[in-house]
């Protein structure tokens, strides 16, 4: 159990048009200029976009894995501890964050292919 930073970064190659940008102490994750996640290498954590309902459910169910990061509009961002999650579940969460952010036609093309 647990996902390394390298494994996480490799997951991003499975999603179209992911852009990585260096922040002060994080790497931002965007699709077509819109953010869907952040990676903090120092703490081995990832912040991912989710719905508020998903954010509440994940944190309530497994607070040792997930933390509330913040909410914005209808979205609730979640901090994920990489050492406490398996790669399959993390990839599902990353894909969902990407789908919540990418334009519909890009999502449809990805899901079709």
Image (cartoon, rainbow, N blue to C red):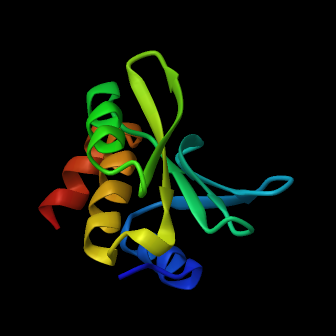
Which residue is located at x 35 percent, y 82 percent?
1
Q: Establish if 64 lies above or below 33.
A: below
Q: Residue 30 in the image: x percent, y percent?
A: 56, 50
Residue farthest top in this picture: 73
85 or 15, nearer to the observer: 85
Above or below, 48 relative to 26:
above
x and y percentages locating residue 6 in the rendered image = 56, 84
Residue furthest to the right in view is 24
At a point 56% along the width and 42% down the height, the residue shown is 35
Question: Going by the image, does 9 lie left or right of 43?
Answer: left
Q: Is residue 78 above or below residue 20?
A: above
The quadrant in which the C terminus is found is bottom left
Q: Nearer the viewer, residue 71 or 96?
A: 71
Q: Is residue 39 left or right of residue 79?
A: right
Q: Is residue 107 above or below residue 73?
A: below
Q: Which residue is more in the foreground, 69 or 9?
A: 69
Residue 47: image x %, image y %?
54, 49
Residue in the image at 35% along x and 65% along y: 90
Occupied quadrant, residue 84: bottom left
Rendered location of residue 37, percent (x, y): 54, 49
Q: How many marks?
A: 0
Front-lying residue, 86 or 34: 86
Residue at x 31% of width, y 38% of height: 60
């Amino acid at each position: 159990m647990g996902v390394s930073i390298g494994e996480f970064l490799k997951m991003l190659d499975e999603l179209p048009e992911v852009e990585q940008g260096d922040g002060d102490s994080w790497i931002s994750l965007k699709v077509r200029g819109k953010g869907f996640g952040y990676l903090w290498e120092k703490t081995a954590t990832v912040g991912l976009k989710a719905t508020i309902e998903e954010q509440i459910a994940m944190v309530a169910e497994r607070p040792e894995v997930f933390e509330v990061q913040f909410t914005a509009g209808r979205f609730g961002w979640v901090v994920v501890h990489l050492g406490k999650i398996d790669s399959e579940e993390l990839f599902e969460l990353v894909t969902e964050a990407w789908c919540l952010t990418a334009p519909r036609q890009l999502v449809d093309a990805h899901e079709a292919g």
